[in-house]
Image: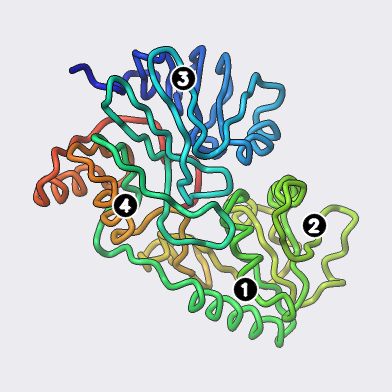
């Protein structure tokens, strides 16, 4: 029996439906797992994404031909049955289930198994073959529980605020930044945001997501009016001239890579907080086991190491080459 999905130089392709999943080269029909730029790219003839993911995609990609689908809804595309299921990565993210002649394959995109209180929680999907990321596919990567993480950030912010210092915290604009602002104690002080983060906030608020009050940093805002504020910034902003207006601020980075102390030192950061919108080692293993899949394809991250581990656990595991993983700070 032919494979339901194949791996091509343009992306993950379904011959029975004549569509691609998260392609990195222009194609006629693209099914998109979520709105991060390494998965949702410009130049496709037509897009299909979840209703929740669509506003962010339109903001990023402009006037595109975009159709939407709800979680659990089944669409017949050619000879393939397609449905989208929550991936827990960021709001609107999805695993894409494709069934052809009784064979079920699932392309997970990016995912995490922890319910972050913001994204639609991850739901395991039974399948014969599972396509998984392995961004953090080593045993060293285990995430800090969210309540402990919030306490760590609040303690750091409060100490800085008591000394009149800003606390600049770096996070990706879609997903992680909103998780952080919902997790922290807004009674400590005001929350200032970089424009890219505030643009995303506006989109999510318009969709009904509840976020605390924030203040966009623009040329008209005198940041000295907000001493001790928490400043949420993108990784590029914290490393550039934009951050200089806050003087000798405390600097932190929320990322799974903060597990590795050398990464924090190389970035010149005061604090590193272990937090990711990707599955950690335990999450990857539990998610794969829950699918019941016998065949697993690993797409990006610690691919060879994780493949060897899966083989040792009895899976028919393969590494495939993709162009995912270059977009976010994880």
Residue tagged by mark 1?
A: 250
Quadrant position of residue 78: top left
Q: Secondary structure at mark 3?
A: strand
Between marks 3 and 1, how big is the CA–CA gap?
52 Å
Considering only order in the chain, which callout, 4 or 3, is on the residue closer to the N terminus?
A: 3
Residue at 44% over, 52% down: 122
182 vs 70, nearest the viewer: 70
Between marks 1 and 2, how big is the CA–CA gap?
17 Å
Residue 70 percent coordinates (x, y): 57, 36
Considering only order in the chain, which callout, 2 or 1, is on the residue closer to the N terminus?
A: 2
Answer whether labels 2 and 4 touch (C-beta < 8 Å): no
Considering only order in the chain, which callout, 4 or 2, is on the residue closer to the N terminus?
A: 2
Quadrant position of residue 47: top right
Between marks 3 and 4, how big is the CA–CA gap?
26 Å
From the viewer's perspective, is the residue at label 3 or at label 4 nearer? 3
Residue tagged by mark 3?
A: 76
301 vs 313, nearest the viewer: 313
- In this rendering, position of residue 162 left or right of residue 226: left
Residue tagged by mark 2?
A: 217
Dot 1: within a 10 Å radius of its alpha carbon, few (fewer than 14), some, or many (20 or more) residues?
many
Residue 287: mark in rendering: 4
Residue at 72% over, 47% down: 207
Between marks 1 and 4, how big is the CA–CA gap?
36 Å
From the viewer's perspective, is the residue at label 1 or at label 4 nearer? 4
Between marks 3 and 2, how big is the CA–CA gap?
46 Å
């Amino acid at each position: 029996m032919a494979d339901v999905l194949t791996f091509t130089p343009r992306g993950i392709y379904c011959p029975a439906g004549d569509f691609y999943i998260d392609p990195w080269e222009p194609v006629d029909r693209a099914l998109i797992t979520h709105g991060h730029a390494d998965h949702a790219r410009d130049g496709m003839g037509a897009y299909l994404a979840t209703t929740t993911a669509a506003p962010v995609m339109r903001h990023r990609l402009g006037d595109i031909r975009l159709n939407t689908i709800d979680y659990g809804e089944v669409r017949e595309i050619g000879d393939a049955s397609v449905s989208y299921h929550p991936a827990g990565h960021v709001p609107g993210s999805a695993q894409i289930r494709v069934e052809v002649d009784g064979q079920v394959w699932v392309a997970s995109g990016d995912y995490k198994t922890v319910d972050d209180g913001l994204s639609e929680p991850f739901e395991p999907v039974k399948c014969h073959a599972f396509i998984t990321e392995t961004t953090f596919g080593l045993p060293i990567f285990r995430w800090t529980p969210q309540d402990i993480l919030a306490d760590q950030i609040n303690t750091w912010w409060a100490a800085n605020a008591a000394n009149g210092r800003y606390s600049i915290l770096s996070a990706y604009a879609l997903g992680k930044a909103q998780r952080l602002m919902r997790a922290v104690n807004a009674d400590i002080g005001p929350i200032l945001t970089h424009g890219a983060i505030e643009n995303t906030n506006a989109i999510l608020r318009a969709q009904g997501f509840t976020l605390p009050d924030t203040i966009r940093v623009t040329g008209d805002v005198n940041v000295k009016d907000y001493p001790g504020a928490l400043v949420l910034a993108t990784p590029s902003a914290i490393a550039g001239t934009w951050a200089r207006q806050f003087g000798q601020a405390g600097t932190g980075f929320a990322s799974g890579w903060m597990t590795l102390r050398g990464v924090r030192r190389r970035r010149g950061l005061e604090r590193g907080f272990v937090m990711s919108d990707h599955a950690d080692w335990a999450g990857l293993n539990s998610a794969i086991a829950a699918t019941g899949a016998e065949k697993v394809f690993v797409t990006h991250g610690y691919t060879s190491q994780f493949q060897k581990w899966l083989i040792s656990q009895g899976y028919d595991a393969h590494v495939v080459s993709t162009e995912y993983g270059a977009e976010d700070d994880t």
